[in-house]
Each structure stands twice: as C-alpha cells, then as structure tokens.
Image (tube, rainbow, N blue to C red):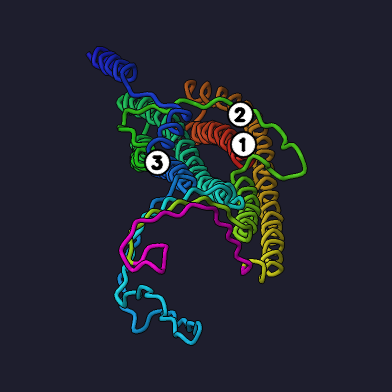
C-alpha cells in the first residue's frame, strides 16, 4: 500500500515538473531590459533629441512678422526756404506740405535666412552629443539592472541546488528512520538510535523550510526586475559557460558603458565649442517688407500710402569674440577633467577585474579539491554502509559519515555554481 502511494506521489511530482514554468538567464535579462524604465527613458531621449534637431532647422524656413505702431510727435520736420528777391520783387516761398504730428505705420515682413554662420549645424551636433551622453547614462543604469538580474538568478540556482541536495538528505533520513524502527522491534537498535535519526530529520526539515523561504524571496525579487510571473514551481535552467575574451586595445574593459559615457562627454564638449564659435560668425538674410503708413516712404507726402522694401541684411555680433580665450581654456580644462575621470575609471575597472578573476581561480581550485574530497568520502561511505548493514558500525557513526559525504557533495555543487557565477561576473566587468 505504501509503495503504491509513494508511486502515485512520484508520478504527480513528475507531472508537475513537466508542466512547471522554465526560465533561462537570457530570458530574464531580455525581460528586465524591456520591463525596466531605463529602456523607455532611452527611447524618449532619442525622440526628444530628434525633435530638438528638427526645431533648429526651422531657422531656414521663411520667417513672417507683422509690426505696427502709432505715434504722436511733438514736433516734425519743416522746411524753411528763404526765397531771393528778383528785381526788387520778393518771391513767395513754395507751398510745401506739412508732415502730420500723428503718424502710424504697419508692415508685413518676410525674412529668408541664407547663411547662419554654421549655427544650425553646430547646434544639431551639440544636441546629438548631449543625447548620446544621456543614452550612455541610461546604458549604465541598464547594465546595473542586468548585473542585479544575473546575481539573483545565480542565487536562485544555488538555493535550488541546496534544496535538491537537502531533499536527498531527507529521503535518506526517512529511510534510516524506517530501518531503525524495524530494528527497534527486534531489539537490534535502541530508542536512542531512533531519537538521533529523528533529531537529524527535524534539523533537515528546518533547513529545507529556510531554503524554501529564501527561494520565494528570490523569485519575488526576480519577478519585480523582469516583470515575469514567477511561482514556486518555476525552474531556473543552468546557463551556458561564458567565453571570456581578453580586452583589446589600451583601455581596460573598452566595452563598458562608462567608457562610452566619457567618449560622449568629450564629443559633447567639442560640439559645444563649435556651437560657441558659430555664434560669433556673421549671418546673411534676404527680406521683403510691404506696409501702409502715414507718411509712406516719401516723407514729403503727408497722405497715407502703401510701400514695399526688399533687400539683404548682414549681421555680425563681435561680442562672442571677447571671451574667446576663456572659452577655449574652459574646453581644454573640461577635456582634461574627462581624461582624469577615465583614468580613475580604468583603475577601478582594473581592480574589479582583478577581484573577479581571482574569484574564478579560487573556485576553480575549490572545485578541484572538492571533487577529490567527494571521491574519498564515497569510498569511506561505501565501507561505512557495509559495516552498518553487517552490524559492525553503529547507526550514529554511519549517520556522521553520511552527513560528511552529503556536506561535501553540497559544497562541491555550490562551488561549481559559484565558479560559473564568477565567470559571469568577469564577463560583466568586461562589458560583454
């Protein structure tokens, strides 16, 4: 009867595992990238940059303006012409029109920019560079999210491995409990032996429950990052071993987003300098004006009249040249500051890589020694099991040997996962 129930339970567990949700590290990273706000932020910054660049080119669209004014002048221009006497006869002055004291003017003007001194082009490059800086900052934030997901995923794998090994311990202790109970009825075992097995069972169940709660917390955290609905039945697949390539060039970890950020800042400072120089260049524009006023263009005609003016306008503001040397020094100092930041970054990256690679070597050594230890303990365990079955070894001694072997296996499995995680950490430090 018990065998039938046990078979049914195993069949149900197998069915549940077949239908359990399976996740991979690549899926979690991809979901976290799509789910995290940094992705949408990067897209919005790109769209905003494009809109700002388009807005600059509006300067080359014909500009239409309307202007109107009305004025009362306390005094106006008058012509006082002295006429000579002809043959003793005084010639009267001509009857000239008088300009009105109340004057008004309204005109519509169209201006077409011909050359802006490179302002629009330089401004476009400045916006492009600034957008690249913001996108690099988003990439750094996204990289931190990716690193967090990797750490959570490996922590989940470690807990799963510990739970798997703990389940083996529980099953072995259950077997020992049944065996000691049967021996107790025949007088070949004592109550103390049964209590020892029961104590180990309680400890193992407590450990298993702690691991289960830790697993649930890790799944909740991973679900928050990825947006995936993860349940207790979720199974995490073992990632593939990353191929670690050495960094190329003179920079440490040149693929890191921090280098991209500093490169973008350098380009942004150069673009700002070009935009500053462009503002000190002259501009050339064509214009046409049509209006109605009193007086019109003929100042001697006091009657209202329509008029028009067409021409070209050259404008050059020399004010930007006054602090040219100051701005140039500012550019050089900014670039020097960025290079100093890069030096600090490379020192930090070198330290991180050194620690990560040292961790890889450490776990490689531990895995090698752990395998040797498990092989030795398995031979010891085989002899202990034979002695326990023949009655030449006490149950307590057998359990002690069993615990040592289980602990060694657990540590070896954990070290193998830690080695895989350490290699992923090296990969992340390299920005791969």
Residue of label 1: 427
Count the marks: how many? 3
Q: Is residue 207 visible?
A: no
List x then y, in percent, for residue 260: 61, 45
Between 193 and 407, which is closer to the camera in this rendering?
A: 407
- Gap between marks 2 and 1, in whole Å? 7 Å
Q: State the SS at label 3.
A: helix
Q: Is residue 375 magenta?
A: no
Q: Are the residues flagged by discs 2 and 1 in contact, CB closer than 8 Å?
A: yes
Residue of label 3: 40
Rendered-image quadrant of the N terminus: top left
Q: Tell me: residue 166, above or below residue 240.
A: below
Q: Which of the 4 image quadrants contains residue 103?
A: bottom left
User: Is label 2 or label 3 in front?
Assistant: 3
Between 308 and 326, which is closer to the camera in this rendering?
A: 308
Image: magenta residue range? 295-319
Q: Tell me: residue 372, above or below residue 130.
A: above
**Is residue 416 toward the left or the right of residue 333 in the image?**
left
């Amino acid at each position: 009867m018990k065998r039938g129930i046990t078979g049914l339970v195993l069949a149900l567990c197998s069915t549940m595992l077949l239908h359990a949700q399976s996740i991979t590290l690549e899926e979690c990273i991809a979901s976290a990238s799509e789910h995290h706000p940094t992705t949408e932020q990067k897209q919005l910054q790109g769209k905003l940059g494009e809109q700002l660049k388009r807005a600059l080119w509006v300067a080359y669209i014909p500009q239409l303006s309307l202007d109107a004014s009305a004025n009362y002048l306390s005094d106006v221009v008058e012509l006082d012409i002295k006429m000579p006497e002809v043959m003793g006869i005084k010639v009267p002055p001509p009857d000239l029109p008088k300009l009105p004291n109340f004057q008004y003017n309204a005109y519509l003007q169209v201006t077409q920019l011909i050359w802006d001194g490179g302002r629009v082009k330089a401004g476009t490059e400045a916006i492009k560079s600034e957008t690249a800086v913001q996108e690099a900052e988003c990439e750094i934030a996204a990289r931190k999210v990716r690193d967090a997901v990797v750490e959570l995923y490996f922590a989940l794998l470690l807990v799963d491995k510990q739970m798997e090994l703990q389940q083996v311990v529980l099953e072995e202790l259950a077997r020992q409990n049944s065996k000691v109970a049967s021996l107790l009825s025949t007088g070949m075992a004592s109550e103390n032996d049964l209590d020892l097995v029961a104590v180990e069972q309680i400890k193992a169940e407590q450990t298993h429950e702690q691991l289960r709660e830790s697993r649930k917390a890790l799944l909740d955290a991973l679900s928050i990052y990825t947006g995936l609905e993860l349940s207790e039945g979720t199974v995490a697949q073992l990632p593939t071993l990353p191929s670690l390539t050495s960094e190329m060039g003179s920079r440490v970890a040149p693929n890191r987003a921090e280098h991209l950020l500093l490169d973008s800042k350098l380009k942004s400072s150069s673009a700002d300098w070009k935009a500053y120089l462009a503002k000190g260049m002259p501009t050339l524009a064509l214009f046409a004006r049509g209006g109605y006023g009193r007086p019109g263009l003929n100042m001697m005609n006091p009657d209202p009249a329509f008029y028009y003016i067409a021409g070209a306008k050259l404008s050059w503001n020399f004010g930007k040249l006054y602090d040219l040397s100051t701005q140039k020094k500012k550019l050089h100092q900014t670039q020097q500051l960025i290079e100093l930041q890069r030096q600090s970054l490379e020192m930090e990256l070198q330290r991180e890589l050194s620690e990560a690679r040292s961790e890889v070597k450490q776990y490689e050594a531990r895995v090698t020694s752990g395998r040797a230890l498990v092989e030795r303990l398995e031979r010891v365990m085989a002899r202990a099991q034979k002695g326990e079955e023949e009655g030449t070894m006490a149950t307590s001694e057998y359990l002690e040997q069993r615990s040592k072997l289980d602990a060694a296996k657990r540590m070896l499995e954990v070290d193998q996962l830690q080695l895989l995680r350490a290699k992923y950490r090296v990969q992340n430090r390299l920005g791969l």
